[in-house]
Amino acid sequence: MLNIKAVHKPHVVEATVILLMVLGIISVSIIGVQAVPHIPIILSLFFLMMYGLIRKVKFKDIEEGMILGAQGGLGAILLFIFIGLLVSSWLISGTIPTLMFYGFDFISPSYFYAIAFLLTSLSGLVVGSSLTTAATIGVAIIGIGEALGFSMAITAGAIVSGAFFGDKMSPLSDTTNLASSIVKVDLFTHIRNMAWTTIPAFIISIMVFALLSPSKNDIDLSQLHFLQEGLSQTGLIHWYSLIPVASLIVLVLFKVPALLSLAINVVISIGISFLHGSTKANELFTILFSGYESKTGIESIDSLLTRGGVNSMMFTISLVILSLSLGGLLFKLGIIPALLSKVSSMIHSTRRTILSTALSAIGINLVVGEQYLSILLTGEAFQSQYKKLGLHPKNLSRTLEDAGTVINPLVPWSVCGIFLTDVLGVSTISYLPFALFCLISPIITVLYGFTGWTIEKDHSELDSVVKH
């Protein structure tokens, strides 16, 4: 959106008022009315259209701003489509069920909270969805913890921490793809760079969860064994179903572009699905578009495995289009440029820029309760500042995830907070102190900003400056 030329130059006070009104429309609608974010964003677009017309802006320019904003998300939209295909193909190939099946073997009587964190981390990485992980594996673990008299708050905190670790680091995650796409960073470059902050947060979290774990040796694992039996009944558990995971790792190591890596993996997974005959050729296209439907008759298993497909990504794709259109219009009407110029006059260092980015992402989560908007609006607002300071855009994408993606489940009125409280039966306020990974991540990213460690310069920009 940095190439969108503003057609209006509002005073910083006017720009602030307009932006606060937009955030007010969105936050009241999402928090108060519990509306899906799409409609509030559309209402905000209507409001900005009226503002533009009152300020004598041509409707053609208003329309152009929305279109140019939406065009910036085409890369992300293509990735989301391929993610939908990959999830479906990983289900029919047995990759996701096999990883889950063997993952349950890690449950041990000791270190219950640490193992809950590890299992949900693995599930989040494989599935690419924190909410799906919490609603399936998480529910099973919380049931075990409750039956054994363990702390529900700590158990829920471990589940939320693991689910969002997996969501943050998974190439299948929509927020991970969104954060990398919005600042035009290769997906796997973004994930590798996140490891600098994510791995320390992971290690600290698992150590604390291990210390908090009770020392009981008589844990009843019947619920997990029941899930394992249900997974085995699908006929999808095979050693060769892990080939797609290995191939994805190899492709990442060889730095193959994300879109090509996903495409190759889809082809490999489809090929494997024919080895165990789980899918007929005439059903394949339907599954790839509409998703895989599990019919084991076991509700928990069917809930876990019924997902994927291009159609499953349409909610996210439509939200991205609308959000980027909103961002484009905010740029076209000069709202964000006016605020950025003011912020730029106050921020002259890498430290303050990264701190401001983190606080903005957290602030939007608190006000709006929506992680997509936190990533989109903050990413668009700070791109120019990172470019001005010669910082590599992957520093921005990492901060967006460290302070945007993982904060949403800590907000009681947010989309994730409400969902997690409902499915886990533990209030957001109760598990918040124990969602260690989510609490530690933004602290580490801000500390890195202050120390300068792992903060890379954009050498392509520096070379360009030298040449000129």
Image: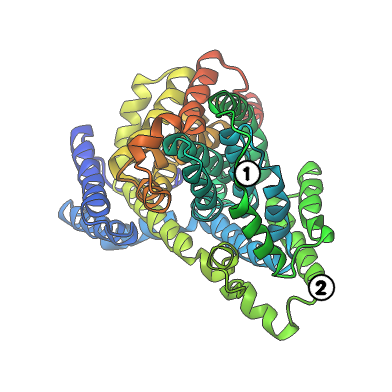
**Residue at x-position 73% and y-position 64%:** 94
- Residue 369 is left or right of residue 160, and the answer is left
**Residue at x-position 58% and y-position 38%:** 117
Amino acid carrying label 1: it is Leu
Asked whether the viewer can see residue 361, the reply is: no
Q: Residues within 10 Å of mark 1 (few under 14, many from 20)?
A: many
- Residue 29 is left or right of residue 143, and the answer is left
Amino acid carrying label 2: it is His
User: Which residue ends up furthest to the left in the rendered image?
Assistant: 54
What is the total number of numbered labels drawn onto the structure image? 2
Instruction: Determine which residue is flagged by label 2.
Output: 276
Location of residue 138 in the rendering, given as x and y in whole percent from the top left corner: 52, 49
The answer to whether residue 372 is above or below residue 304 is above
Location of residue 444 in the rendering, given as x and y in whole percent from the top left corner: 52, 23
**Residue at x-position 34% and y-position 42%:** 427
- Residue 189 is left or right of residue 413, and the answer is right
Location of residue 125 in the rendering, given as x and y in whole percent from the top left corner: 63, 47
- Residue 448 is left or right of residue 418, and the answer is right
Q: Secondary structure at mark 2?
A: loop
Q: Residue 306 is drawn in which quadrant?
A: bottom right
Q: CA distance from mark 2 to mark 1?
A: 27 Å
Q: Which mark is residue 119?
A: 1
Q: Secondary structure at mark 1?
A: helix
Q: Residue 89 is drawn in which quadrant?
A: bottom right
User: Which residue ends up furthest to the bottom in the rendered image?
Assistant: 282
User: Which residue ends up furthest to the front in the rendered image?
Assistant: 218
Location of residue 261 in the rendering, given as x and y in whole percent from the top left corner: 74, 55
Asked whether the viewer can see residue 45, the reply is: yes
Q: Which of 31 and 110 lies nearest the eye of the viewer?
A: 110
Q: Residue 198 is drawn in which quadrant?
A: top right
